[in-house]
Amino acid sequence: QALALLGNVLYFGRSSDPSGSDLFVYNIANIANNSMPLIAQANVGTSVLSLTVSGSYVFMATSQANNEFKVWHSDPNNFTAVNTNFNFSNLINNGIKYENNFVYLASQGNDALKILYSP
């Protein structure tokens, strides 16, 4: 459901799979040669609706009730959650963007736009 690219690294989020991973990281440096090795994966525990990557972080909008926004380390060697305790209800598919140290989140709730600063 969600794709983000940082250099030669592709981040892929999908609908939740109770028995497996929901977030994957691929090296696409040799994609012209049909090579796209998986370098990391994780079970987020919910569907990844949207994601964006910048520097050290992966920012995700998810379908998990009362915990819709998640921040993970982007390093495939340390692919773990930084903080998953954000209750931003009704985040929408493709409703997250990152630009100039700001994360923009769109939702269908009363607070239709949230803007976060990420130093």
Image: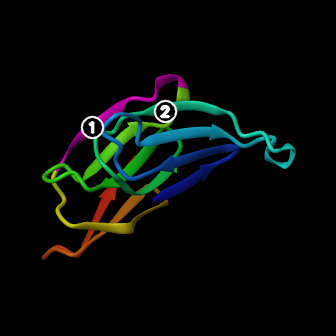
Q: Quadrant of residue 62?
A: bottom left
Q: Residues within 10 Å of mark 1 (few under 14, many from 20)?
A: few
Residue 97 vs 54, above or below: the answer is: below
Quadrant of image for the N terminus: bottom left
Q: Position of residue 48 (x, y in %)?
A: 37, 52
Front residue of 38 and 99:
38
Tag shown at residue 107: none
Residue drawn 51% across and 40% down? 24
Cα distance between the residues tagged 1 and 2: 17 Å
The residue that label 1 is drawn on is 83
Q: Residues within 10 Å of mark 2 (few under 14, many from 20)?
A: some
Boundaries of the magenta span: 77-86
Residue 108 vs 53, above or below: the answer is: below
Q: Going from the N terminus, do you reach mark 1 or mark 2 first? A: 2
Residue 47 on the magenta segment: no
Q: Residue furthest top?
A: 77
Q: Position of residue 31 (x, y in %)?
A: 79, 46
Residue 47 vs 41, above or below: the answer is: below
Asked which secondary structure carries label 2, the reply is strand
The residue that label 2 is drawn on is 41
Q: Amino acid at mark 2?
A: Gln
